[in-house]
Image (spheres, rainbow, N blue to C red):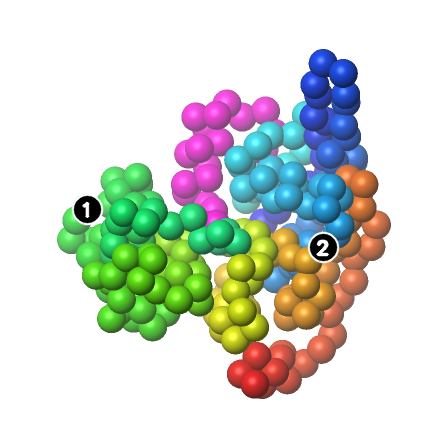
Amino acid sequence: MIEIKNLSKVFRTEEVETKALSNITLKVNQGDFVSIMGPSGSGKSTLLNILGLLDSADSGSYQLVNKEMVGLKEKDRSKARKENIGFIFQNFNLIDELSVYDNIELPLIYNKVSAVARKRKIEVIANKLGISHRLKHFPQQLSGGQQQRVAVARALINDPLLILADEPTGNLDSKSGNEVIELLMDLHANGATIIMVTHSEHDASFSQRTILMKDGEIVLEKNNSRNFDVLVKESKN
């Protein structure tokens, strides 16, 4: 699904040049669940932004479903992003002035889905995520865990090929965080491809493999061999 070769990104100001990514090579297959870890400034957020087509690399290759993404014009990047990628953010990024229903509906409107189809899809995803009774509420009326479930619903509503999660439990208490991780595990078990940036080794242990970054480079990649059934039990405690 994703194949990256020698990907590099440099941020420049008048006085400073900072190499954010240096010759990154990475492959993610359909159905993989991958965590990316590293200290602040390691390049993990820059990599996630490029994977999500929110930014573009300066050199190298990024192929998403066999199509080259590096060098695309913003219009084409936006189209590819809407068609293929769902985002889950640390800060939820919900619009406070809109109801839960309206927040979930937005991506469908952007993709010009009919009103009838939008209603049907929202009802299905809300039921799946256990937030059907919250559709008329506003984000500030929900707990952090419920807000993240709304964010997940919004991320999934267009049936994306790839889910990118940026510190999805970072603003949550342990119980709500475990609920979100369990939800990601369920999505993965049903075939979702997930790439998650996290500072938490505990959260990363739920993925199939962990990539460690430092100074803009991948310094280690390891498989996570812990039993998923055990992790589900841990998340419920």
Name the residue: 15% across, 53% down: 116
Left or right, 107 with respect to 14, comes to: left
In magenta stretch: residue 73: yes
Q: In which quarter of the image is residue 140?
A: bottom left
Q: How crowded is mark 2: few (under 14 residues within 10 Å), some or many (20 or more)?
A: many
Left or right, 161 with respect to 137, comes to: right
User: How far, Cα to Cα, is label 1 from label 2?
Assistant: 40 Å
Q: Mark 2 points at which residue?
A: 37
Q: Quadrant of residue 109?
A: top left
Name the residue: 52% across, 65% down: 172
Q: Residues within 10 Å of mark 1 (few under 14, many from 20)?
A: few
Q: Nearer the viewer, mark 1 or mark 2?
A: 2
Q: Mark 1 points at which residue?
A: 114
Name the residue: 31% across, 69% down: 131
Q: Which residue lies furthest to the front in this view?
A: 140
Q: Is residue 72 above or below residue 40?
A: above
Q: Residue furthest top?
A: 14
Residue 62 x %, y %: 64, 37
Residue 185, can we see it? no
Tell me the element at label 2: strand
Choose between 17 and 58: the one closer to the eye.
17
Q: Quadrant of residue 58?
A: top right
Residue 236 x %, y %: 53, 83
Choose between 35 and 29: the one closer to the eye.
35
Residue segment shown in magenta:
68-87
Tell me the element at label 1: loop
Q: In this view, does 232 lie above or below 141?
A: below
